[in-house]
Image: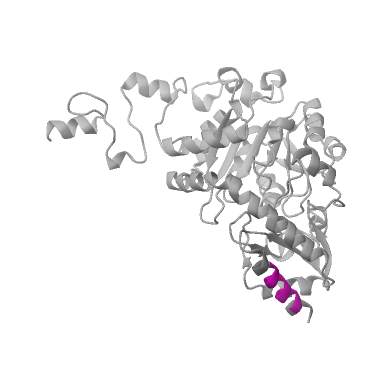
Amino acid sequence: MHDETIAIHAGYQADGTRAVAVPIYMSVANDFIDAEHANSVMDLSTPGFHYNRINNPTNDVLEKRIAALEDGKAALVVASGMAAVSYAILTVATAGTNFVAAPQLYGATYTYFAHVLSTLGIEARFAADDQAESIGTLIDDNTRCVFVESIGNPAGNVVDLEAVAEVAHRAGVPLIVDNTVATPLMLKPLHHGADVVVHSLTKFIGGHGTTLGGAIIDGGTFPWSEHASRFPTFNEPEVAFHNVVFARDFPERPFVVRARSIQLRNTGATLSPFNSFQLLQGLETLALRLERHESNARAVAEYLRGDPRVEWVSFAGFPDNPYHHLVEKYLKGRVPSIITFGVTGGYDTGLAFFDSVQLFKRVLNLGDAKSLVIHPASTTHRQLSEGELIAAGIRPETIRLSVGLEHIDDLIDDIDQALSEATS
């Protein structure tokens, strides 16, 4: 092999300087300088990239930007929002322990909590509602965290994060908040007592319905070492990873380091670097998109509220919304572009509206540049019982709109014709 080829494959130019690029076969792994460097990276004593299942330079850029937006200490990006939710719970909970959750959750999250984690010996305790008092009554010595969505999907409830955080911290457990619907531009849960934040990057942050992704952000605030008996996995040597003690060795970001080293490293829900690139593009326009999302949503909500063919409308922007005081407190008056409503006539009429839209896309996603519609009781929350649907804030006729960026006249025209078809 030519000397220059050998030099570049070793990571250096022929003149001995570090190469700008590495060959294509290195795309799933990164070269080490020498054995000492390899050992220190693998032992977590030296930051570095080694294998793309665990970390990657492109993913690292996305992680740093997401952490900065949430004012967190560090972030981990993974293959989907559900992977982020799963890893967040599994990072603190083990067989024989439990966690407490508000019931207003995304359908897949509810199903995972209620029916999958139980097979691993982890109990999900669903509070009667999203109130701090209801959550606090379920916390005991085996509880490992409290989990809520800052804005419930699709219920639209706004959680009083400070009150819930106080209850969780008084009991010695962290608060994990799914901030997907609000986005960090409307709400930063870490400012209000949350310890860990998760996101489905697929939604508003990606913004175009093209790319799956999830994120976990570590606030670096929870005192793990003060609760050593409750959290031995943070305070005792980790035999599966060179006897590292996460709370001691990584005091600013122990949660994310443990999630990456134990969950991601061993189960591999890795975010593709190309997906990170696409999500970074979406992130650059988030602030601009949210303004149009919000203005369109306010106009659609007002239209629905004034239409006699609509029985009820739930929208955070209405002054008479039961969560309006929390909208003012936490969102500073801004509102997400999620609207739920019921067409007069019940379940069948709701399905008829769903079938009749032409511009709105019948899609499970939300936070897309396109306007989307779903009938939760028959789709996203189909696996829930009648009682679970009620607890999650979903009625048989509930329609959820994710209002996009199209011209408002076109959106209202489509709603009008779909209502006419549904109620004719």
Q: Position of residue 12 (x, y in %)?
A: 24, 28
Chief SS of the magenta region = helix
Up/down of 9 relative to 110, above or below: above
Q: Position of residue 67 (x, y in %)?
A: 58, 33
Up/down of 308 relative to 150, above or below: below
Q: Quadrant of the C terminus?
A: bottom right
Residue at 65% x, 69% y: name it.
410
Q: Can residue 205 be seen from the camera position used here?
A: no
Residue at 77% x, 53% y: name it.
155
Q: Can residue 166 be seen from the camera position used here?
A: yes
Up/down of 408 relative to 114, above or below: below
Colour mapping = one colour
Q: Which residue occupies the foreground of this view, 359 or 252?
A: 359
Q: Position of residue 242 (x, y in %)?
A: 49, 22
The reply, left or right, for residue 19 in relation to residue 217 is: left
Q: What is the residue that sits farthest to the left in this orientation?
A: 2
Q: Which residue occupies the foreground of this view, 215 or 207?
A: 207
Q: Quadrant of the N terminus?
A: top left
The reply, left or right, for residue 307 in relation to residue 272 is: right
The reply, left or right, for residue 360 in relation to residue 158 is: left
Question: Residue 296 is drawn in which quadrant?
Answer: bottom right
Residue at 59% x, 56% y: name it.
368
Q: Is residue 419 magenta?
A: yes
The residue range painted magenta reads: 412-420
The reply, left or right, for residue 167 in relation to residue 255 is: right
Residue at 73% x, 73% y: name it.
416
Q: Position of residue 141 (x, y in %)?
A: 78, 29
